[in-house]
Image (spheres, helix red, strand yellow):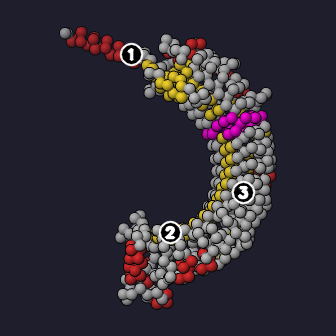
Amino acid sequence: MSPHVFILLLILAIIRAHTASLYTVPQCSNSKLVPHTQYGEYEKRVICSGIQSLKDLSSLVKNDWKQLIIFNPEKQQFLIDDVQDIFSPLEHLDLSQAGQISIDDTGFKALTNMLTLNISGCEIESLKGSHFNTYNKLENLDASWNFLEELSFDLKSKILYLQSANFSHNAIKSIEQDSWQVFQKLKYLHLDNNELRTVNFYNYPQLQILSLSDNQIVELTTKSFDGLESMQEFIMTRNPSNFISSHTFRSMTQLRILNISANSLELLNADVFFGLGRLLELDLSSNNLQQLADGQFKHLTKLMFLDLSRNSLSALNSTAFKTLSSLRKLYLHENDIKEVGPNTFAQLITLDTLDLSQNAIEYLGADIFGASTLPRLKKLWLKSNNLKRLHPLAFASLPFIQYLSLGNNELTYLDVRMFAPMRRLDKIHLGNNLLEVIDPEVFDSLSDVGELLIDNNRLSFLPDTNATFPKLRKVAVEGNPWQCPCWDELTRLLEERQIEYVREQSPYYSGKKPLCVVTPVEACVKDLDIVRRYEIEEIFNRG
């Protein structure tokens, strides 16, 4: 074969291969039977690839095709044009893996029986009412992760049977106001990650879930919502909202969950929550709230979960929570709270969890929990404050506490009366304080605990005690200036009892920091004056 003939054949082969790549033959997998979500029956699901247009399937489509998924790994341009009536039996169409979609004026008009349409991530810039048949049955639409800028009345008026709509991760700046009632059947609407600045939702009688997070909404007023009597959950996080007017949520009388965290709210009138008598969960975390109004939550008589963490609250008073008799969990961590007034939590008779950690509280008085028992309070976090002193009766109303966290404070003394009422205490964390000694009576009152953390204090010995700690499973003791004889005595006991005490991540157990201080005597000295005279803590701190 001459070189010229060889080159010619090679060129022809390259052209043939290139042509074949341009005109890929559609391939559809064997139909699979999948459960029908509504009727419990089975129907066929067809997955096709190498498709540039729905027209490419005209010769393959069959009347029993109900679910069609287009999967194009190369994500090429995909056309929705001149769709024939032969596709009308389709009920579920997933184009989210088809590629960049271009829709002509006829759009999906032929798909009169379509119930579900997924066009997520298809780089669509516009979705019009003219793309849908007047008599379409569409119930579920996922148009997220596109470039849509508007949700027009023209579109809404053509998809009247819609029950679930996801328009999140677009560039929607406005929602055209309805001139007559549409979306009467809509139950779930997601508009997160758009560019909305104002919202006006009127007469969506079936709407149950509305999500507006990550937009540019500055305020909510009484004009924002009306006729939303079926709402169950409203989520609007990470907006620059700094104002919500009174009675804004008045039409949401069935609302169960309200999440308006991570906004810029500084102050809320008590009547903001008017009409929310059935609310169960309220998340106000990560705002700029500086104070709570008197009777702040007076309308929320059934509230069970309240998150006020990561705000700028500096004080708490007894009126803020007094009507929350159903509250179970209250989170107030990471604020600037310096003062907790008398009886602040006295009315919270169903409370089981309270988190006050990472604040600036210096003193805990005798009456912040009131004079009566709080029978359900099980977990209390007070770690990472500036606590220097606890009133001996601070926890007198909490006999059923199981977990108490007092770590990372500045406590120098523990009174036996603090823990004596706690008959069910299982875990107590006292690490990273300034304790030099713990009285034997305190240990006696803690004899039933299962987890005891006293690491990183100023302890050089433990007192002789009658407590046997029969339930003790875990302790943390490193980071204290232990006398070596005292350390040996303690660890020998722990190992005999098979109590966990080594924390592998701690530098004390990896040899980077000392575990104890060598003293002039071989016995464990349990006299604090002598310990101070030996300057054991100073030697330990020098490493």
Q: Where is residue 16 in the image (x, y as percent from the top left)?
A: 35, 13
Tell me residue 362's x, y (percent): 64, 73
Where residue 498 sits, quadrant-wise, is bottom left
Tell me which numbered mark, 2 or 1, is placed earlier along the sequence: 1
Query: Earlier along the polypeptide chain: callout 3 or callout 1?
Result: 1
Q: Is mark 1 on a helix, strand or loop?
A: helix
Marks 2 and 1, Cα distance to the nearest angstrom? 70 Å
Amino acid type for the residue under numbered disc 2:
Glu
- Determine the residue positioned at 66% across, 44% down: 235
Which span of residues is magenta-colored?
187-210
Q: Name the residue under label 2.
A: 451
Nearer-N-terminus badge (3/2): 3
Q: Mark 3 points at which residue?
A: 326
In the image, is residue 165 above or below residue 515? Answer: above
Q: Determine whether the residue tagged by mark 2 lies in a helix, strand or loop.
A: strand
Residue 354 visible, this angle = no
The residue tagged with tag 3: helix, strand or loop?
loop
Instruction: Give the x, y percent position of residue 530.
Output: 46, 90
**From mark 3 to mark 2, how far is it between C-alphas?**
30 Å
Q: Is residue 356 magenta?
A: no
| Amino acid type, mark 1 | Ala
Q: Farthest left residue? A: 1
Specify the quadrant of the image occupied by residue 317: bottom right
Crowding around mark 1 (Cα neighbors within 10 Å: few <14, some 14 to 19, many 20+) is: few
Q: Residue 20 shows which numbered tag?
A: 1
